[in-house]
Amino acid sequence: MTLYLNDLGLLCAVGNSKTEVLTRLLAGDRSGLSVSEEFGVRCFVGAVSVGLPEIEGIYNCRNNRLLLAALSQIEQTVHDMIARFGADRIGIVLGTSTSGVRNTELALAYWAKHGVLPDQFHYKQQQMGAGADFLADFIGTRGPAYTISTACSSSGKAFASARRLIGQGICDAVIVGGADSLCSLTVNGFAALESISTGLCKPFGAHRDGINIGEAASLFVLSKEPGPVILQGIGASSDAYHFAAPDPDAADVIRAMQHALDDAGKTAAQIDYLNLHGTATVLNDAMESKAVNALFGSTVAASSSKGMTGHTLGAAAALELAFCWLLLTHDDDRGALIANINDDEADVTLPELNLAKKGAMLGRRINTCQSNSFAFGGNNLSIVLERS
């Protein structure tokens, strides 16, 4: 069964459209990361800067507004799928880590000051399933609609679930992706773990000291209908090594990457570009370097895009698959690569990787990409995409 990613809508710290995002990624532009004190911790964050569409009713929260903005970019494709297959044959599977919890934070601050909750607040805004419920209600689809929350692999797991819905004949097309918005819960949580960078994050840099948190939404249309990009392989594993720290042995991360390659019918040598999880924490980058070097050696072109977008948590997997989709649909015989931007010197203590520098070219058209996403609790995921 061949499944295609027919269309893409996305917005993040580096842009609010496919063209803008690709242009700024290839330029190595990290101007989307800026200092914020909004969440009680002074740190760099990757915020979406564009004005977001308004939502009336109980679903009005920033997370859903991000989703609505991404949906607007693929609306015609979605309507075409509904017309072709029927509303009951269209599913929605999303990933998120905090959904609209920011609305609850603001509502509780209002309650502490005024003794009542604000009129526009509804608990539904923070529920994990709110995004999928909102999109189904807004679009009018009647197929399965649900959300997966496995921390930073959430929206990657959504792709495995979406593929299963089509494979089992439950859906003919699935809107799949994820969204996460900035909130105090995540900023202060990572600060408590001492995982927030004191400056701009430095993926795989010698002086890396933590993450910059970002926000994003990324939505695809997945179906059997021929499209520009093929969803070729998915590999998952769970090492359950530690609640918040990666297993330094990296065996299960290697297993997830190899499973994705096997599922795609590919070898490591056939991957043109690897988007690394690359959080810029000391432990994650050391573990991922070990895993990638063990499976791919030091030749595959690779980078972490988080040096430009920040770590978008539950949306990260879908966002970074979107970056791969952009490379695979880019009409460029030179194979322009996304650079590993960290403004730092290389960490020579790490196993060697072929980290792309600003302006780097593969030297041929990019045809196959792989992307990694790893989460708390050892939720490891890797996905292979190919140019159609």
Image (cartoon, helix red, strand yellow):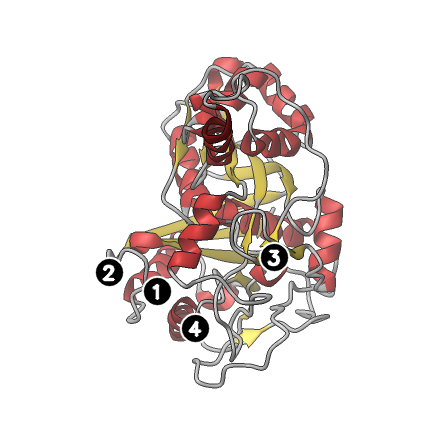
Measure the C-alpha gap from mark 2 to mark 4: 18 Å
Vertical comparison of 46 with 67: above or below: below
Q: Which residue corresponds to mark 4?
A: 289
Secondary structure at numbered mark 2: loop
Vertical comparison of 7 with 305: above or below: above
Q: Is residue 285 left or right of residue 56?
A: left
In percent of the image, x 71 and y 47: which residue is there? 15
Q: Are marks 2 and 4 in contact (CB under 8 Å)?
A: no
Q: Are marks 3 and 4 in contact (CB under 8 Å)?
A: no
Q: Which residue corresponds to mark 3?
A: 367
Q: Could you say where residue 170 lies in the image, as x and y percent from the top left?
A: 39, 22
Q: Amino acid at mark 4?
A: Ser
Vertical comparison of 99 with 58: above or below: below
Measure the C-alpha gap from mark 3 to mark 2: 35 Å
Q: Could you say where residue 163 lies in the image, as x and y percent from the top left?
A: 42, 36
Location of residue 219 by image quarter: top right
The reply to whether residue 202 is in sight is yes
Name the mark nearer the viewer: 3 or 2. 2
Q: Dot 4, how many residues are within 10 Å of its Cα: few (below 14), some (14-19), or many (20+)? A: many
Q: Is residue 74 left or right of residue 85?
A: right
Sooner in the amino-acid sequence: mark 2 or mark 4: 2
Which mark, by number, is residue 241?
2
Secondary structure at numbered mark 3: loop
Location of residue 52 by image quarter: top right
State the quadrant of the N terminus.
Answer: top left
